[in-house]
Image (cartoon, rainbow, N blue to C red):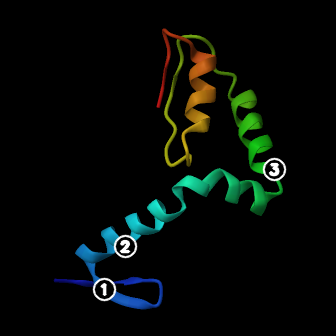
Amino acid sequence: MAQTHFGFETVDEREKAARVRGVFDSVAQRYDVMNDLLSFGMHRAWKAYAVAVAHVRPGDKVLDIAGGTGDLARAFAAKVGARGWSC
């Protein structure tokens, strides 16, 4: 099996996916709190700004890729309404 890097270790490629998942699982419950602390709360303002400048309207489609906890997707879903789509 091919080797790859995970931090400062060399691991099997198959093992890396499980390790990455473990890192995300270990911070998932505290993700927004960590962002609040690390950005002094600015991440919430940045997300609100992103939604505002996107100018989405009811019926529009929005794709949220790797947006964290899904709060951007929820904010966009409120803007696009029942006929739109956000995920």
Q: Which mark is residue 19?
A: 2
Q: Which mark is residue 11?
A: 1
Residue 8 location, x and y as percent?
Answer: 47, 90
Distance of label 1 from label 2 (alpha carbons): 10 Å
Residue 13, quarter of the rendered image: bottom left
Mark toward the viewer: 3 or 2: 2
Earlier sequence position, callout 3 versus callout 2: 2
Distance of label 3 from label 2 (alpha carbons): 29 Å
Q: How many marks?
A: 3
The residue that disc 3 covers is 42
How many residues crowd mark 2 within 10 Å: few (<14), some (14–19), many (20+)? few
Quarter of the figure with the N terminus? bottom left
Q: Are marks 1 and 2 in contact (CB under 8 Å)?
A: yes
- The residue type indicated by label 2 comes to Arg
Residue 44 location, x and y as percent?
Answer: 75, 43
- The residue type indicated by label 1 comes to Val
Residue at the spot 60% in from the left edge and 26% down from the top edge: 76
